[in-house]
């Protein structure tokens, strides 16, 4: 058998034909593989684009020559996956935005709770702490970070606190919102802390209790004031009762028909003195109340300070000389400048200082009334050689109702208003009052006033 090829006649054997057929089959197979590889490559590119997030939406069936059904289905799968990926990204973005908003709101809420004037703990329905403010450390001596998620018996060694806080989840609504307990912290024995519990209720008709807010409130000031008011009422009752008894006793004496005329004069003087004593105490109470309510207006007049001081000392020294055998000294310059003050109010302040110097002095002691002057100020001082004031009490000596705990001071009658009133009167005159005292040796109170030209310059 022969075959013509390019004008030549070639013999063709069966072996040659078989080899040619095999070559043709191989070439055809390679062409098919190459075409199919192109399909797979396009699918691979589309898949990679999908994974990279840059897929355009579908594959082109016409570009894959006869694979339209397969490609459509594959394209549908790609589109579905793409839509779900986009939806998932949207949900993730929304969740991220929501988490940021929640974190911001939570931060604002925490800041608000941390700046609350009282220390607080938020507990869940089981009594475990879910939040605690930093003020707990200073107020109660408890580390706010150490109690998160813990029951009271796990973060405090106080049997008293544990007993009170452990029963919070079982409290009835009637006991919530009022002071549950008052205690003194171990690290600050001078303080009084109250515990108040408020419920955290869920929204809705039922209003289920989700937990409680436990407030720790420093009531030291209120407690001290309440105690002082109680002491004041007791002292005031005693102060008023004593002169009334004396007046009543001498009044009965005057009713006798055979009373000695000298006794009548003596009784009348005692009654007058006791009336004046009661009047001074009542006036102190009224004056300090008027000043605190802002109902006092200064009536400044030009006052010869030396005359006012001499008159006050003469008035007060009579009772002091008779009672304690005291020595009164005066160191007031003859040419002391006049000042513009409310004469009557200033007289009250000076009388209170002189009365205290007499009352808390020692038998045979000395009361010194003096004054000094420079170009800017005039200072008036009252000094005694009495029992003095303890250093730790000096910072409270001008507090209303305050009385020293010293036994010698407690032996003297008093109501704790004189020094407070004197200081307020001096401050109303834009002046100041200072104290220098040595316990057991005596005290010196100094009132300092600015002269009128100085006040005018400061006003301008």
Image (tube, rainbow, N blue to C red):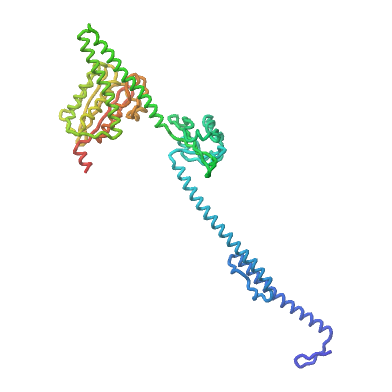
User: In this image, 326 relative to 397: left or right?
Assistant: left
Q: Residue at x 45, y 36 (%)?
A: 138
Residue placed farthest to the left in the image? Answer: 335
Check the image and name the residue furthest to the front.
205
Q: Quadrant of the C terminus?
A: top left
218 in relation to 243, above or below: below
Q: At 24% from the left edge and 10% from the top edge, which residue is drawn? A: 255
Residue 233: x and y in percent read 35, 24
- Quadrant of the image occupied by residue 217: top left
Q: Residue at x 59, y 59 (%)?
A: 88
Q: If the image is split into quadrants, where does the N terminus sit?
A: bottom right
Q: How many marks?
A: 0
Q: Residue at x 67, y 76 (%)?
A: 65
- Vertical comparison of 270 with 28: above or below: above
Given residues 68 and 334, the one toward you in this image is 68
Residue 297 image point, x, y percent = 24, 35
Q: Out of 175 and 383, give the one closest to the viewer.
A: 175
Residue 441, image x and y in percent? 31, 22
Give left or right: position of 179 versus 170: left
């Amino acid at each position: 058998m022969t075959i013509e090829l390019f004008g030549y006649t070639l013999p063709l054997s069966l072996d040659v034909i078989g080899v040619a057929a095999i070559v043709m089959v191989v070439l055809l197979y390679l062409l098919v593989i190459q075409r199919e590889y192109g399909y797979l490559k396009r699918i691979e590119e589309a898949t990679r684009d999908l994974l990279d997030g840059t897929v355009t939406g579908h594959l082109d069936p016409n570009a894959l020559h006869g694979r339209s059904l397969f490609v459509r289905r594959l394209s549908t799968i790609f589109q579905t996956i793409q839509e779900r990926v986009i939806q998932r990204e949207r949900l993730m973005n929304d969740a991220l935005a929501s988490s940021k908003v929640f974190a911001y709101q939570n931060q604002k809420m925490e800041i608000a709770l941390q700046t609350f004037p009282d220390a607080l703990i938020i507990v869940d329905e089981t009594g475990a702490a879910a939040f605690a403010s930093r003020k707990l450390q200073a107020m109660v001596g408890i580390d706010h970070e150490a109690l998160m998620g813990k029951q009271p018996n796990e973060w405090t060694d106080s049997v008293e606190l544990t007993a009170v806080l452990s029963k919070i989840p079982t409290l009835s609504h009637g006991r919530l919102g009022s002071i549950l307990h008052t205690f003194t912290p171990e690290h600050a024995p001078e303080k009084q802390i109250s515990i108040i519990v408020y419920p955290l209720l869920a929204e809705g008709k039922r209003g289920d209790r989700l937990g409680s807010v436990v407030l720790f409130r420093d009531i030291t000031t209120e407690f001290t004031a309440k105690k002082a008011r109680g002491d004041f009422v007791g002292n005031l009752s005693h102060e008023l009762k004593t002169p009334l008894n004396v007046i009543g006793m001498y009044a009965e004496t005057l009713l006798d028909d055979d009373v000695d005329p000298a006794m009548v004069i003596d009784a009348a003087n005692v009654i007058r003195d006791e009336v004046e004593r009661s009047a001074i105490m009542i006036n102190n109470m009224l004056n300090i109340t008027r000043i605190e309510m802002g109902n006092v207006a200064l009536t400044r007049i030009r006052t010869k300070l030396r005359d006012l001081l001499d008159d006050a000392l003469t008035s007060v020294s009579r009772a002091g000389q008779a009672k304690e055998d005291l020595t009164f000294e005066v160191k007031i310059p003859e040419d002391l400048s006049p000042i513009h003050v409310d004469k009557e109010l200033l007289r009250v302040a000076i009388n209170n200082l002189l009365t205290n110097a007499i009352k808390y002095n020692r038998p045979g002691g000395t009361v010194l009334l003096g004054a000094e002057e420079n170009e800017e100020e005039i200072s008036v001082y009252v000094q005694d050689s009495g029992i003095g004031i303890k250093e730790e009490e000096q910072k409270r000596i001008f507090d209303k109702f305050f009385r020293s705990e010293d036994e010698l001071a407690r032996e003297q009658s008093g109501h704790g208003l004189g020094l407070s009133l004197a200081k307020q009167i001096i401050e109303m005159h834009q002046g100041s009052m200072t104290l220098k005292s040595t316990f057991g040796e005596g005290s010196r109170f100094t009132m300092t006033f600015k002269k009128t030209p100085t006040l005018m310059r400061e006003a301008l």
